[in-house]
Image (cartoon, rainbow, N blue to C red):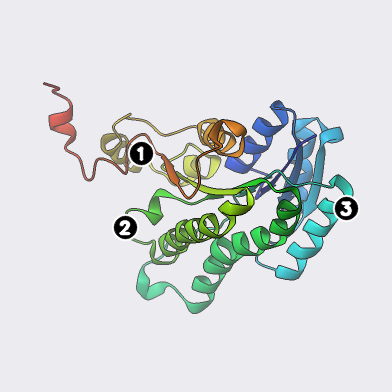
C-alpha cells in the first residue's frame, strides 16, 4: 500500500488532503503539533486502520527526524510528502518582531526543508517519490501585513525548484500548490463581510475556493497522472494571481 505523509494534517487544507489520499487507498501519516486536534481529526476520519498519527513540530529538526524514522520503520515506504504545516500572523513591518519573524520562517520554510530532508533517503532507496509544498498566493503577489508570511512562502516556492532540480534524476518530483483565498474555518472567522466582498470582486471566479479543491490539486501532483511535472507552482486561486488588480465594473459588462 502506498504511503502519504501530510504535515499540519489536523485541520483545514491538511485534513482535506488526508481525506483525499485515504479515499484513493493510501496509508496516510498525519503529522500535527496539536495532539488534541489531531486525535479529533483521526476520530472524524474513522479509518484508523490506515492512519498513523504523529505529534510533531516541523520546526524542530530532532522531532522531525525521529518521526520520519518511525514512519519508515512501521510502513517501510514514503510515496508522497505534503508539506502543509504553516503559521500566519499578519502584522505591519514595524510591528513584526524578530521572534515573530523567526517563528514564521522556522515553521513555513525550515519545517518543509527538515521534513523533506528526512524523507528523501527513503525515496532515494525506492527510486521514486513526490513532494508537494503548500505555498500561498501571498508568495507570488505582495500585499500589506505579510512581510514575514509572504516572504516565507516565496522562499518555499524557490526551495521547491531547488529540490526539483537536484532530485529529478533520482525519480523524485517536487512541486508546489499556491492556494488563494480558501473558505477555511480560520478565514470564516477573521474575514469580515467587507474583506470577502473585496476578494470576490478581485477573483475572476468570483468566490472563495474550497479546501477539497486544493486537495484535488495536491493529489494530482502526488499521483502518476502528473509523472512528467516537476519544479512547478500551481495556483489554486480562482484566477486571482493572473488578473492583477482587476476592474470589477468593467468585468460586470463582458464584451
Looking at the rendered image, the disc whose residue lies closer to the viewer, 1 or 3, is 3
Q: Is residue 89 visible?
A: no
Residue at the disc numbered 3: 73
Foreground label between 2 and 1: 2
The earlier-in-sequence mark between 2 and 1 is 2
Callout 2: few (<14), some (14-19), or many (20+) C-alpha neighbours within 10 Å?
few
| Along the viewing direction, whichever of 147 and 96 lies nearer the viewer | 147
Residue named by callout 2: 142
Mark 1, other Cα within 10 Å: few <14 / some 14–19 / many ≥20: some
Q: Is residue 249 left or right of residue 116?
A: left
Distance CA(mark 1)–CA(mark 3): 46 Å
Answer with mark 3 or mark 2, whichever residue precedes in sequence.
Answer: 3
Image check: 83 left or right of 228?
Answer: right
Secondary structure of the residue carrying tag 1 is helix
Tag 3 and tag 2, C-beta contact below 8 Å: no
Residue at image coords 45%, 63%: 155
Give the residue drawn at x 56%, y 52%: 168
Q: Is residue 251 left or right of residue 203?
A: left
Look at the image and tell me in which quarter the N terminus lies: top right
Using the numbered discs, state the Cα–Cα distance from disc 2 to disc 1 in whole angstroms. Answer: 18 Å
Quick one: quadrant of the C terminus? Answer: top left
Mark 3, secondary structure of its residue: helix
Residue 142, image x and y in percent? 32, 57
Q: Which residue is mark 1?
A: 196
The reply to whether residue 154 is visible in this rendering is yes
**x, y percentage for residue 148?**
44, 66
Report how far apart the C-alphas of labels 3 and 2 lie in the structure: 42 Å
Q: Locate residue 106, reporting x and y percent.
A: 58, 68
Where 199 sits versus 160, above or below? above
Amino acid at each position: 500500500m502506498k504511503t502519504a505523509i501530510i504535515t499540519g494534517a489536523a485541520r483545514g487544507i491538511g485534513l482535506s488532503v488526508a481525506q483525499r489520499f485515504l479515499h484513493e487507498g493510501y496509508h496516510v501519516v498525519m503529522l500535527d503539533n496539536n495532539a488534541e486536534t489531531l486525535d479529533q481529526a483521526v476520530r472524524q476520519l474513522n479509518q484508523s486502520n490506515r492512519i498513523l498519527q504523529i505529534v510533531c513540530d516541523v520546526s524542530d529538526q530532532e522531532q522531525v527526524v525521529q518521526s520520519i524514522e518511525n514512519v519508515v520503520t512501521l510502513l517501510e515506504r514514503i510515496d508522497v510528502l505534503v508539506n502543509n504545516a504553516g503559521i500566519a500572523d499578519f502584522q505591519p513591518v514595524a510591528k513584526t518582531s524578530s521572534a515573530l519573524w523567526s517563528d514564521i520562517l522556522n515553521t513555513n520554510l525550515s519545517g518543509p526543508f527538515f521534513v523533506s530532508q528526512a524523507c528523501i533517503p527513503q525515496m532515494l532507496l525506492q527510486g521514486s517519490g513526490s513532494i508537494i509544498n503548500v505555498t500561498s498566493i501571498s508568495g507570488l503577489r505582495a500585499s500589506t501585513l505579510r512581510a514575514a508570511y509572504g516572504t516565507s512562502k516565496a522562499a518555499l516556492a524557490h526551495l521547491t525548484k531547488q529540490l526539483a532540480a537536484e532530485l529529478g534524476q533520482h525519480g523524485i518530483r517536487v512541486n508546489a500548490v499556491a492556494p488563494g483565498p480558501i473558505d477555511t474555518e480560520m478565514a470564516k472567522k477573521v474575514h469580515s463581510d467587507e474583506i470577502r466582498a473585496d476578494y470576490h470582486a478581485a477573483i475572476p471566479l468570483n468566490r472563495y475556493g474550497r479546501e477539497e479543491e486544493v486537495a484535488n490539486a495536491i493529489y494530482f501532483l502526488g499521483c502518476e497522472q502528473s509523472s512528467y511535472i516537476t519544479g512547478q507552482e500551481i495556483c489554486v486561486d480562482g484566477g486571482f494571481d493572473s488578473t492583477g488588480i482587476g476592474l470589477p465594473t468593467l468585468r460586470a459588462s463582458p464584451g
